[in-house]
């Protein structure tokens, strides 16, 4: 697109003074109660005799490009010509299509056509009639939706909890005032409906056009879907779309082969798109994966692309963070700005967002990857690409090593302060050669080669992003080497805040919410908050604190060097707790290595005691995960212990209510492993004298893991349970402050006290 703009401008500057470049046009069309305003700029216009020129540039063969796209190029030119003829009262006009080859601008193709105003009038009448019919459908659906909300929307539960009422009022005011808000709503508040209900009310008041419900986990998507289904069942006619990842919904055996030559679902896709959209909308309000897949397969259209296209017609879209935060989806944000739509994102479990954004904006390119790509580029058709890759490999191998940085050199690491210009230029040339060949013959590219091409594009984007003024120092760029040979180049985002802020600014109001936004200043800062007193709200917990027991054993060191010495005492704490009441427990281990040590202890204990032990493995698919959770049954008359890893797949997003989980034992304060990247993150935040860099890089993310794991126990007002935290670092002022903030009712105990305190708790909560 940037190259196209440059070519346009260069070509226009060469035209003589009889031509007016970027000629402004406007047109108003009225039909009954509809007024449609059209405005834009024609590329070039000669007024005597009237000639309207449309300029297109492409890397494709110009004759083929004209044959494939001439209809809509000509239509675009005709629309401009109609507006100018009407404005100047002209009866005739010449249309001129000019095609320019990207990368070889001396190669051009021109096509001209003479038309009368009568021809143009007929074209416009037909076009606008069809457009009015299309717009009417959208307006009618919107009116039906608004009426149904006014007539049928009611809170779907008999009781509105105090916390829900507070949260709903906050969200309504935030949307009315076009602000951003950060809400901590404890587990059990009923935050899903508390976020959706007031926002849907604003849909009915036409204060907003649609809602994006963003989440990081499928289980949360399912909760949101089920909540909205209950509203649809009560005659609220809101159209809800559940987005499914391309990987999971693509029906093509050759995933990622999204061209008509290799995928029947891509053939003639756009010919029937609008009809297909309204066909599905006419019979469904909940567009979940099952509905999208069955309809798409019946119509033989791409279900993934169909989701993206039908999204703009839906009132609520439930999707992963990456659909608006990942740089691969930047066009989505540009379209939002152009359409001026008032969309309110509801960002659930927002404590996960900073880490997710950091991963989205990080990449590693390996030398071995370059060599493997070269191996895949055999054959004369790849010669130009292979030559460009050779040059890029040479430049990659020549990236500068900072020999003055002795500390990092010990670990074969060198930080790059500025990417060399020649490296970036060769990267651009390599991408362009790939792009040109892909356009001509996509079927000759293997999946691995396509993946490599996409990585190159990501590398280019991240290099450019790291050079932006508002992203200064937000990236760490470094190389790893061995025996003076560079093995990898890594770009790592260490501060996601500017990215999150930029995306947030595309929307008039944004609702960030989570059960755990602690430490509050840390998350408020990372998520782009301005004034913590004004825009961070903490909803009071609906729980009777007598129904939970928070115990902290701060006598045992869980530092890495001490873990072998204290594991027997940790095991003793576990047994003292679980033997007081039969039921379901989860033990959160600091690592898989430590998990193995605990497993050996528990297996030995199991030989003489009636317990069931289930253990998380390092790789579990969704089916294995469900099987694992199915062991946590209500009214279990036998003790079941789930041994899992802290910060893993069972640390959040699981909902074991009632007796399905009565206790959680969290071992360690969750500090991430010491690493070069984490240390650089620490150094980055340490530049701000008002914060502690170590806490931002290590302590705070670790403590949030602890709080998330602890939150698995109490899921509803009726739940009862015990949380035991074990680590000597809870004696430190920082952790005592964080405990006071999250669990003001915690009790410091020793191993000898656990049985007495636990038995008393269960006696009081029979």
Image: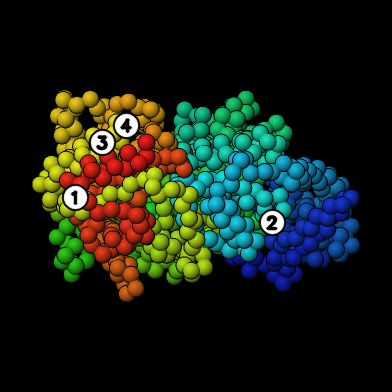
Does 661 appear above or below 333?
Answer: above
- Name the residue nearer the viewer: 647 or 100: 647
Q: Secondary structure at mark 1?
A: loop
Q: Quadrant of the C terminus?
A: top left
**In the displayed structure, does residue 180 sit left or right of residue 604?**
right
**In the displayed structure, does residue 570 sit left or right of residue 515?**
left
Residue 104 visible in the current orientation? no
Using the image, tell me which numbered label, if any, was put on residue 750: 1
Q: CA distance from mark 2 to mark 3?
A: 55 Å
Instruction: Identify the residue shown where x is 47% and y is 33%.
Output: 248
Q: Mark 3 highlights which residue?
A: 580
Q: Mark 2 highlights which residue?
A: 207
Residue 240 in the image, given as x and y percentages of width and height: 62, 40
Residue 34 in the image, given as x and y percentages of width and height: 84, 52
Q: Nearer the viewer, mark 2 or mark 4?
A: 4
Does 325 appear above or below 686?
Answer: above
Asked if marks 3 and 1 touch (Cβ < 8 Å), the reply is no
Disc nearer the start of the sequence (2/4): 2
């Amino acid at each position: 697109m940037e190259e196209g703009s440059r070519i346009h401008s260069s070509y226009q500057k060469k035209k003589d003074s009889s031509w007016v470049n970027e000629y402004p046009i406007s047109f108003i069309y009225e039909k009954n109660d509809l007024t449609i305003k059209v405005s834009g700029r024609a590329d070039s216009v000669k007024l005597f005799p009237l000639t309207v020129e449309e300029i297109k540039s492409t890397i494709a063969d110009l004759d083929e490009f004209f044959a494939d796209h001439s209809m809509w190029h000509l239509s675009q030119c005709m629309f401009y010509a109609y507006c100018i003829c009407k404005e100047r009262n002209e009866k005739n006009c010449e249309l001129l299509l000019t095609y320019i080859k990207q990368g070889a601008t001396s190669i051009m193709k021109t096509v001209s056509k003479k038309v009368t105003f009568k021809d143009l009038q007929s074209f416009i009448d037909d076009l606008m009639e069809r457009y009015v019919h299309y717009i009417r459908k959208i307006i009618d659906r919107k009116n039906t939706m608004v009426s149904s909300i006014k007539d049928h929307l009611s809170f779907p539960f008999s009781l509105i909890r105090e916390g829900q009422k507070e949260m709903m009022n906050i969200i309504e005011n935030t949307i009315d005032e076009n602000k951003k808000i950060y809400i901590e709503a404890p587990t059990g508040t009923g935050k899903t409906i508390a976020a959706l209900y007031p926002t849907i009310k604003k849909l009915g008041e036409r204060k907003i056009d649609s809602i994006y419900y963003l989440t990081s986990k499928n289980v949360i998507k399912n909760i949101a879907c089920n909540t909205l289904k209950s509203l649809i069942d009560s005659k609220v006619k809101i159209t809800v779309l559940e987005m499914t990842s391309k990987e999971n919904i693509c029906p093509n055996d050759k995933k990622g082969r999204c061209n008509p030559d290799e995928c029947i679902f891509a053939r003639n896709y756009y010919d029937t798109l609008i009809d297909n959209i309204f066909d599905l909308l006419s019979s469904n309000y909940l567009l979940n994966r099952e509905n999208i897949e069955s309809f798409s397969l019946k119509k033989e259209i791409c279900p993934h692309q169909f989701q993206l296209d039908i999204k703009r017609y839906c009132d609520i879209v439930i999707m992963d963070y990456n659909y608006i935060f990942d740089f691969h989806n930047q066009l989505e944000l540009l379209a939002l700005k152009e359409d001026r739509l008032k969309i309110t994102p509801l960002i659930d479990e927002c404590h996960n967002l900073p880490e997710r954004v950091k991963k989205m904006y990080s990449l590693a390119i390996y030398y071995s990857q370059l060599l493997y790509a070269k191996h895949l580029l055999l054959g004369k058709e790849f010669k130009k690409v292979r030559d460009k890759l050779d040059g890029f490999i040479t430049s990659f191998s020549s990236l500068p090593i900072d020999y003055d940085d002795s500390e990092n050199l010990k670990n074969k690491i060198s930080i790059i302060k500025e990417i060399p210009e020649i490296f970036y230029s060769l990267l651009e040339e390599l991408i362009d050669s790939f792009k040109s060949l892909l356009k001509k013959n996509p079927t000759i590219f293997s999946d691995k080669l396509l993946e490599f091409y996409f990585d190159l594009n990501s590398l280019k984007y991240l290099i450019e992003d790291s050079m932006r003024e508002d992203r200064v120092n937000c990236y760490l760029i470094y190389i790893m080497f061995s025996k003076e040979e560079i093995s990898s180049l890594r770009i790592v985002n260490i501060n996601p805040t500017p990215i999150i802020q930029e995306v947030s600014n595309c929307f008039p109001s944004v609702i960030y919410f989570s059960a755990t936004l602690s430490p509050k200043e840390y998350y408020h800062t990372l998520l782009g908050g301005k004034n913590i007193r004004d825009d961070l709200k903490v909803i009071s917990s609906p729980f009777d604190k007598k129904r939970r027991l928070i115990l902290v054993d701060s006598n045992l060191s869980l530092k890495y060097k001490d873990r072998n010495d204290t594991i027997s005492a940790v095991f003793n704490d576990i047994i003292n707790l679980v033997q007081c009441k039969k039921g379901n427990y989860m033990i959160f281990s600091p690592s898989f290595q430590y998990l193995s040590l605990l497993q050996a202890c528990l297996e030995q204990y199991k030989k003489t005691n009636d317990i069931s032990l289930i253990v998380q493995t390092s790789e579990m698919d969704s089916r294995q995960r469900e099987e694992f959770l199915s062991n946590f049954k209500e009214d279990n008359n036998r003790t079941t212990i789930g041994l899992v890893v802290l910060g893993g797949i069972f640390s959040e997003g699981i909902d074991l209510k009632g007796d399905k989980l009565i206790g959680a034992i969290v071992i360690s304060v969750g500090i991430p492993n010491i690493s070069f990247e984490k240390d650089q993150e620490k150094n980055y935040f340490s530049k701000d004298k008002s914060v502690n860099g170590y806490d931002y890089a290590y302590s705070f993310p670790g403590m949030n893991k602890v709080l998330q794991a602890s939150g698995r126990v109490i899921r509803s007002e009726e739940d009862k349970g015990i949380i035991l935290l074990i680590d000597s670092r809870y004696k430190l002022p920082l952790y005592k402050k964080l405990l006071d903030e999250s669990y003001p009712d915690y009790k410091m105990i020793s191993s000898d006290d656990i049985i007495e305190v636990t038995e008393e708790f269960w006696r009081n909560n029979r």
